[in-house]
Amino acid sequence: MLSLSILTAFVCLTPFVIAAPSELQKRVDTTTYCGQYDSVDTGTYTLYLDQWGKDNADSGSDCASVTSTSGTNIAWTTTWTWSGGSGVKSFTNINVNDGLDVKLSAISSIKSSWTWTQTTSGTVVADIAYDMFTSSTSGGSNEYEIMVWLDNINAGAISYTYGSDGSATPIVSSVTIAGYTWDLYYGSNGSNYVYSFLTADGSAIKSFSADLMDFFDYLTSNEGLSTSQYLTTVQGGTEATSGSATLTS
């Protein structure tokens, strides 16, 4: 179950303002989709099957569905399997539709909770994470990607620096944000600068509740991210590289 609510200085965004939750519940599309770029729009959120690296796999598939919505909550599931090739094959995610294209300085909070379980088989390489983007202009191209990893299964954060064993090294270690302790990594994916917060002890957070704005506040106060950046995207999902898994949120 995933819940997100963005509060700006101008308006408190609450879901389902057009119809009552019970009415929308009747209309929610619970079909299972498997297309490379299929999506399901629930009004407040959109489920995206973003299989952008599918062609790099020798074989595999990714299917997902919304199972229910209630108030600010959305329940969903995805089952994927990928083999061969390199790099991320898919990022199935829930994207918040409202409260975007606002300067960071105008956002008071991004409250979110996310409870999930996952079953795996084979040697899995994947992560489960929030993924957020900012731009220096309204409606502009993404420049910064901010990730908060709730699980890291044999994957690695993007980084400019690596240790002698080939693993990424953080620019900051053991920083406490939103009640959890994180290592912060920094690098580039070729299109955006990427900040990645991974749990310092490598543990998975299967029941997460926090204000995601705390991570932006840390970056603007300590890493030079400008408060004039516009928030363009807030989403949460799983980046899958290889193996098989079913994520239930």
Image (tube, helix red, strand yellow):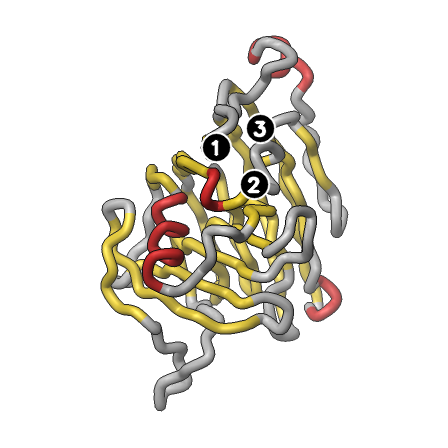
In the image, what residue occupies the spot 55% across and 39% down? 77
Name which residue type carries label 1: Thr
Mark 2 or mark 1: whose residue is earlier in sequence:
1
| Mark 2 in CB contact with mark 3 (< 8 angstroms) | no
Q: Looking at the image, is mark 1 or mark 3 nearer the viewer?
A: 1
Mark number, residue 102: 2
Q: Which residue is mark 1?
A: 8
In the image, what residue occupies the spot 54% across and 67% down? 193
Mark number, residue 67: 3
Please tell me which residue lies in front, 136 or 244: 136
Name which residue type carries label 3: Thr
Horizontal side of 89 relative to 10 (left or right) equals: right
Name which quarter of the figure residue 89 lies in.
Answer: bottom right
What x and y, as percent, mark residue 40?
Answer: 69, 34
Q: Secondary structure at mark 3?
A: strand
| Mark 2 in CB contact with mark 1 (< 8 angstroms) | yes
Name which quarter of the figure residue 185 lies in.
Answer: bottom left
Mark 2 or mark 3: whose residue is earlier in sequence:
3
How far is disc 1 from disc 3 in space, using C-alphas? 29 Å
Q: Residues within 10 Å of mark 2 (few under 14, many from 20)?
A: many
In the image, what residue occupies the spot 34% across and 73% down? 171
Name which residue type carries label 2: Val
